[in-house]
Image (cartoon, coloured by chain):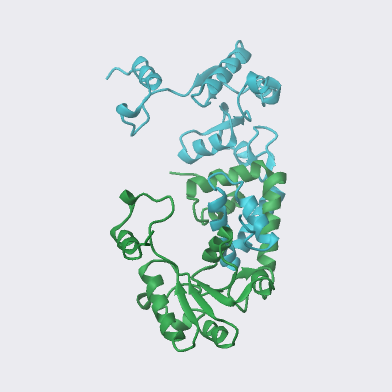
Chain colours: A cyan, B green
């Protein structure tokens, strides 16, 4: 039988920390202990940073990104190529592309993928706002940077159908061997895609 | 070249989360995203819980435990056996023993181990307060529940020397095969200890 190890304030902290991805009940306890042992250096600053984030973060009404301003920093940036929209599933994907710093386009965050089995249809995603942006002029290319999963790819197909006839170039990310990847560890689908899209040297 | 993915408020949150044990830079980013996507259900409650913890947690002047009251819940609990003091290195060890609910004693948290190489001497640990508690009468046994590491065991030896002649029984945790452990995976030291302390059936 396990007893509560500390006051309800600490238990509450542990339980909330355990809901973070990557932290289980045990590591949440370790994290809580780490925090309360570093009250002034870590616990208080983190509490304030969370408070500030909770108060200031909004969803960008234009692209669906999360930032402290609406429109977000990227949508407001005049150096961004406004003729290209890079469509992603989630804000995390946007962050990943921004970290790689390989694209200078604006984004559009769908908020997930179509999933009829889970009852997620087109109206549950930011698709209407995408077709609106596509039709507002100035956009010449839409890159569907969706995950290479069944859900991601079927969502991409749906979007292609929706955007057909708009005169806008629709592109998708290339499939193939990940840079640094070893063939021995790759699945057949990836290998097949890499062979099909092989480049002549 | 990596760009900042979001405003300074989010970057600050990510950097503080990355200082939690068990979270690296990548998982801190994932945790931050998880938090800001669940602003009302998780981010705000966690911010408040941290604020409350930062304001209310104090170190127990008697045993060194961390709680929201001084003396702590355990030191105040009249059902605890006041004749036994269980000495641990850190508050985390106290929590581990409390979770197991195998001991009904009071505790004494040393705050670490002796480590001459790191410049940690007896004055840097809560040793004076332990000998004081031991000498205040009523205590009949002191269990040295220190880690089975070189530092833990040398600290235990030091404490034994300090408490010698007080008439108090000094005990330590048993060494042996962990319950559920397989011999094949155990080190020689553990096996040697388990054989030396073998029980006649």
**Residue at point 32%, 18% (across, down):** A199
Of residue B188 and residue A118, the one placed in the foreground of this image is B188
**Residue at point 56%, 76% (across, down):** B84
Image location (x, y in percent) of residue A152: 54, 23
Of residue A143 and residue B92, the one placed in the foreground of this image is B92
Image location (x, y in percent) of residue B196: 32, 65
Q: Is residue B10 visible?
A: yes
Q: Is residue A176 left or right of residue A63?
A: left
Q: Is residue A57 left or right of residue B8?
A: right
> Which residue is outermost to the front?
B201
Image location (x, y in percent) of residue A134: 63, 21
Asked if residue A194 is positioned above or below residue B80 in the image, the reply reads above
Of residue A5 and residue A86, the one placed in the foreground of this image is A5
Q: How many marks?
A: 0
Q: Is residue B196 left or right of residue B161?
A: left
Asked if residue B194 is positioned above or below residue B145 in the image, the reply reads above
Q: Is residue B4 visible?
A: no
Question: Quarter holding the C terminus of chain A?
Answer: top left
Question: Quarter holding the N terminus of chain A?
Answer: bottom right
Of residue A77 and residue B32, the one placed in the foreground of this image is B32
Image location (x, y in percent) of residue A80: 56, 35
**Residue at point 56%, 62% (across, down):** B102
């Amino acid at each position: 039988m396990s007893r509560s190890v500390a006051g309800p304030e600490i238990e509450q902290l542990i339980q909330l920390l355990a809901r973070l991805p990557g932290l289980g009940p045990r590591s949440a306890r370790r994290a809580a202990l780490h925090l309360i042992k570093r009250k002034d250096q870590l616990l208080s600053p983190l509490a304030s940073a969370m408070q500030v984030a909770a108060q200031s973060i909004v969803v960008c009404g234009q692209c669906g990104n999360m930032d402290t301003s609406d429109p977000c920093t990227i949508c407001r940036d005049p150096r961004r190529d406004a003729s290209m929209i890079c469509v992603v599933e989630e804000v995390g994907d946007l962050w990943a592309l921004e970290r790689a710093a390989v694209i200078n386009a604006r984004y559009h965050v769908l908020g997930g993928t179509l999933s009829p089995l889970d009852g997620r249809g087109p109206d549950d995603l930011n698709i209407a706002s995408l077709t609106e942006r596509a039709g507002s002029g100035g956009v010449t290319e839409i890159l569907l940077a969706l995950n290479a999963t069944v859900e991601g790819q079927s969502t991409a197909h749906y979007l292609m159908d929706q955007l057909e006839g708009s005169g806008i170039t629709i592109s998708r990310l290339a499939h193939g061997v990940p840079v640094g990847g070893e063939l021995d560890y790759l699945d057949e689908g990836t290998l097949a895609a890499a062979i099909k899209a092989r480049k002549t040297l």
